[in-house]
Image: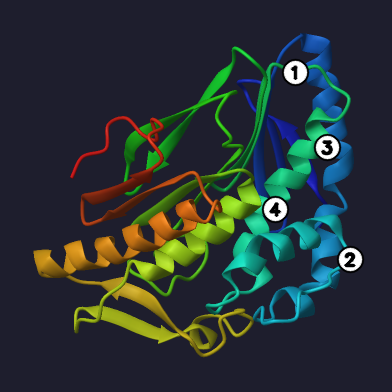
Amino acid sequence: MSAIAARLSDGRLHLQHGPIDLIIEAFGAADEVERSYSQAVERFGDILPTLVRELPILRRCVTDAHPLPHGPVARRMAEAVWPHRAVYITPMAAVAGAVADEMLQALVKGRRLDKAYVNDGGDIAIHLTPDHELHAGIFATALDGVARLTFDQPVRGVATSGRGGRSFSLGIADSATVLAATAAAADAAATVIGNTVNVHHPAIERRPARELDPDSDLGDLPVTVAVGALPPALVEEALDRGAAEARRLRLCGLIEGAALSLFGRWRLETAGMALAEGLAG
């Protein structure tokens, strides 16, 4: 299957190749925007084939030996998950964010843009210049809040993990949205935090990842299939565990903030910045 590039009715650029599905938007002078889109299209064709060649490395659990992939996206993935190697994690935990980061770099290289973003299925890489801002929606089951991102903040990546998403989760979070310096860093951290939003209860159904997808990088680890009704105290306990991990990662300088949700309840972990508007619970 070949890579597909198309313009949406509102002018945004849509790029799709296999499982990679990107929405890209740039703001600025019309000629600069058009050149940036051409650069993105030119870069995109090689992304998936290069990743596929390195899948055996990218699906291995990271241990004390730093993965040494060759491609630029694969290197971004390995770098993003390395700080989390104390738990089970593979570079695949950062694949969507790393693709977004790589494509954003191609989009803005040499261009004069006011702002831009690359959205890879909800994992977003962001470019901002002074006096410009972007608003990123925070979703659990609907649009629940908005994060206002400005140039003077260090956030240039947003990612969301949780059960029911595109990837398997070891936890039970409806969503774990993370703000970080890059989309790859946010993607890896969202995976870790989402896994930590967790408790044990008969209403939680889990199955080995390999039974659901023989190629899953999670192997025989039990991933969450369904979550039934839980006692309110367990909902709070699961969110508290995720919030504690988010706080640890923020204090370690790995993320800037996080918003966690489960059954309509929320936990926010921020450093005093306006992470989200509209979240309740």
Q: Is residue 166 above or below residue 267?
A: below
Q: Residues within 10 Å of mark 1 (few under 14, many from 20)?
A: many
* Residue 173 can be seen, yes or no: no
Q: Quadrant of residue 198?
A: bottom left
**Judging from the image, what secondary structure is the residue with disc 2 in?**
loop
Q: Residues within 10 Å of mark 2 (few under 14, many from 20)?
A: few
Q: Which of disc 3 and disc 4 is earlier in sequence?
A: 4
Left or right: 148 in relation to 9 = left
Earlier along the polypeptide chain: callout 1 or callout 3? 3
Residue that appears at 60% across and 85% down: 214
Disc 3 secondary structure class: helix
- Amino acid identity at mark 1: Leu
Which residue corresponds to mark 1?
113
Residue indicated by mark 4: 98
Distance of label 2 from label 1 (alpha carbons): 30 Å
The answer to whether residue 235 is above or below residue 64 is: above
Image marks 2 and 4: residues in contact by CB distance under 8 Å: no
- What is the distance, in whole Å, between disc 2 and disc 4 at their CAs? 14 Å
Relative to residue 150, is residue 161 depicted above or below?
below
- Kind of element beneath mark 1: loop
Residue holding disc 2: 70
Residue type, label 3 = Ala
The disc labelled 2 sits on which kind of residue? Answer: His
Q: Which mark is residue 106?
A: 3
The mark that comes first in sequence, 2 or 1, is 2
Identify which amino acid the numbered label 4 is placed on.
Ala
Instruction: Using the rendered view, name the quadrant where residue 171 is placed.
Output: bottom left
Q: Closer to the N terminus: mark 2 or mark 3?
A: 2
Marks 4 and 3, how far apart at CA: 13 Å
